[in-house]
Image (tube, rainbow, N blue to C red):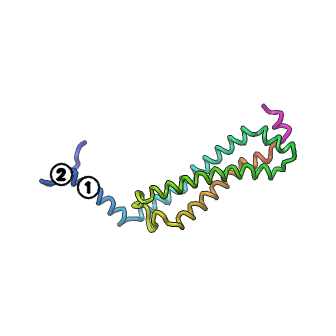
Amino acid sequence: MESLFRLKPGVTSEAANGELRALTRRLGKENPSTNGEWNARAVPLAAEVVGFGIYSVLSYDVNQRRQELSVRMALGAQPRDVLWLVVRQGLWLAMIGGAAGAAGALALGPALSSLLYDVSSGDATAFAVALAVAIVTALAACLQPARRAAALDPLSGLRAD
């Protein structure tokens, strides 16, 4: 690796690397606005990825369970019952993911504390906001597959496949 600078006589590369790491940590704490800007861009992107993941899984599941849902409706299930069945399934997925994410955040929070601005790694308010965003994202991702499942025609669903 080429060097873009020369070390002072008597300074080892390990000492210089240590100083650079310390400087990076200090700059992160002294200029937290850059961390906030990064978080402001990353959070909506993460919410989109999560929402698309839940939407994809539920859409695939509704398509695979078309006959089962048609039988339920043919036997008297109301469209709202089928809708809530799919929404509950999506919220269950979101709860499992949220629990895993919260555990990961609590475990990795201290290591990533230099990226946080004006909040501690175990802040209850931050967790509550993240939980609210996750629930809203999951509900939004569940609605279209649930509506499609509730609108199934039992007769055509039974004839398919």
Where does the image place residue 88, in percent across and percent down from the top left?
71, 52
Quadrant containing the C terminus is top right
Identify the magenta region: 153-161
Please identify the quarter of the rendering in which residue 27 is found.
bottom left
Mark 2 nearby-residue class (10 Å; few <14, some 14–19, many ≥20): few
Q: Amino acid at mark 2?
A: Thr
Mark 1 — residue? 18
Residue for point 20% across, 50% down: 13
What residue would you read off at disc 2?
Answer: 12
Sequence order check, earlier mark of 2 and 1: 2
Crowding near the residue tagged with mark 1, few <14, some 14–19, many ≥20 C-alpha atoms within 10 Å: few
Height in image: 158 above or below 129?
Answer: above
Residue with the most extreme top position? 161
Which SS does the magenta portion mostly show? helix
Looking at the rendering, which quadrant does residue 18 occupy?
bottom left
Total tally of numbered discs in the picture:
2
Q: CA distance from mark 2 to mark 1?
A: 10 Å
Check disc 1 and give the amino acid type. Gly
Q: Say if the magenta span includes residue 159.
A: yes
Residue 25 location, x and y as percent? 33, 60
Query: Residue at left 83%, top 40%?
Result: 71
Q: Is residue 85 left or right of residue 17?
A: right
Residue 1 position within the rendered picture, expressed as x and y whole percent measured from the top left: 25, 42
SS at circle 2: loop
The residue at 84%/50% (across/down) is 78
Name the residue at 80% across, 51% down.
81
Residue 121 inside the magenta-drawn segment: no
Tell me the tag on residue 133. Answer: none
